[in-house]
Image (cartoon, rainbow, N blue to C red):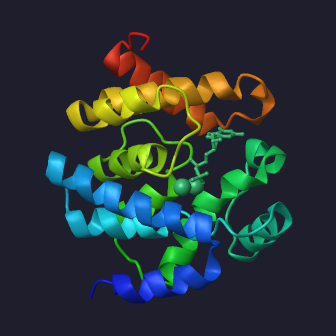
């Protein structure tokens, strides 16, 4: 049986701050809309969106401690920037605390921050929804990417990766191998033209 979304919402509303909870709802509903557009499972998209940041409330020290507790690996980039671990730990907690068993949903949570090469449709939907949900306002090219998301999902993934990598250029030592590989893969796939 699929976990009950209302129960999950109630739990998350107590665990996350109000801003993060609002973002979470925004990602869930945006992911559901993208699922409608691209023919993915709407319930799965909403569930993955709801849980994608379920480990976001922990500070760096707690993130590392919990990853060690659950025997999750911590890469060099993750050691330099433990906030990356909220994605991996989030997938782990989605199984343990929220009874999610579907591997595609768990991977969408796990890879929502770095992305990865050859993502599934659901993984791309959550990755993009996280970036464009209505409460987001800081990222460059947001209007363009919001439109692109509903016309060409792969191009939207590629554009987000390009902008994320440009932002991370200031701190190259913290770029995760998976982020880099994902970016190269999607930029090659789409022969991205600058926005
Ligand atoms: O948790 P959210 O804030 O909703 O969003 P997120 O999980 O996508 O995290 C966004 C941040 O993660 C954004 O500032 C870019 C950053 N990021 C993505 N890949 C990497 C990364 N940061 C570092 N240091 N290294 C990466 O490889
Ligand atoms: Fe996140
Ligand atoms: Fe998020």
Q: In the picture shown, does residue 42 fall above or below 170?
A: below
Q: Residue at x 59, y 64 (%)?
A: 20
Q: Is residue 190 left or right of residue 8?
A: left
Q: Residue at x 51, y 60 (%)?
A: 23
Q: Residue at x 51, y 57 (%)?
A: 110
| Count of residue discs | 0
Closer to the camera, 69 or 100? 100
| Occupied quadrant, residue 48 | bottom left
| Occupied quadrant, residue 147 | top left
Percent position of residue 33, x then y = 24, 54
Percent position of residue 156, x then y = 36, 31
Location of the C terminus (image quadrant): top left
The answer to whether residue 65 shows anywhere in this view is yes
Q: Is residue 109 left or right of residue 33?
A: right
The answer to whether residue 52 shows anywhere in this view is no
Q: Residue at x 51, y 65 (%)?
A: 22
Location of the N terminus (image quadrant): bottom left
Identity of the residue furthest to the left in this view: 39
Closer to the camera, 122 or 134? 134
Q: Quadrant of ligand 3?
A: bottom right
Percent position of residue 77, x then y = 75, 42
């Amino acid at each position: 049986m699929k976990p009950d979304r209302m129960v999950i919402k109630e739990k998350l509303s107590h665990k996350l701050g109000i801003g993060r909870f609002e973002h979470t709802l925004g990602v869930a509903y945006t992911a559901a809309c993208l699922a409608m557009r691209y023919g993915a499972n709407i319930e799965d998209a909403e569930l993955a969106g709801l849980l994608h940041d379920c480990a976001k409330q922990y500070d760096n020290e707690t993130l590392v401690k919990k990853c060690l507790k659950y025997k999750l690996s911590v890469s060099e980039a993750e050691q330099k920037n433990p906030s990356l671990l909220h994605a991996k730990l989030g997938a782990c907690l989605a199984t343990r605390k929220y009874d999610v068993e579907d591997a595609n949903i768990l991977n969408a949570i796990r890879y929502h921050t770095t992305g990865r090469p050859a993502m599934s449709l659901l993984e791309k939907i959550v990755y993009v929804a996280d970036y464009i949900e209505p409460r987001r306002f800081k990222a460059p090219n947001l209007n363009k990417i919001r439109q692109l998301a509903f016309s060409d999902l792969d191009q939207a993934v590629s554009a987000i990766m390009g902008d994320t990598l440009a932002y991370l250029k200031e701190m190259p030592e913290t770029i995760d191998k998976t982020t880099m590989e994902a970016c190269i893969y999607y930029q090659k796939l789409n022969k991205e033209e600058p926005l």
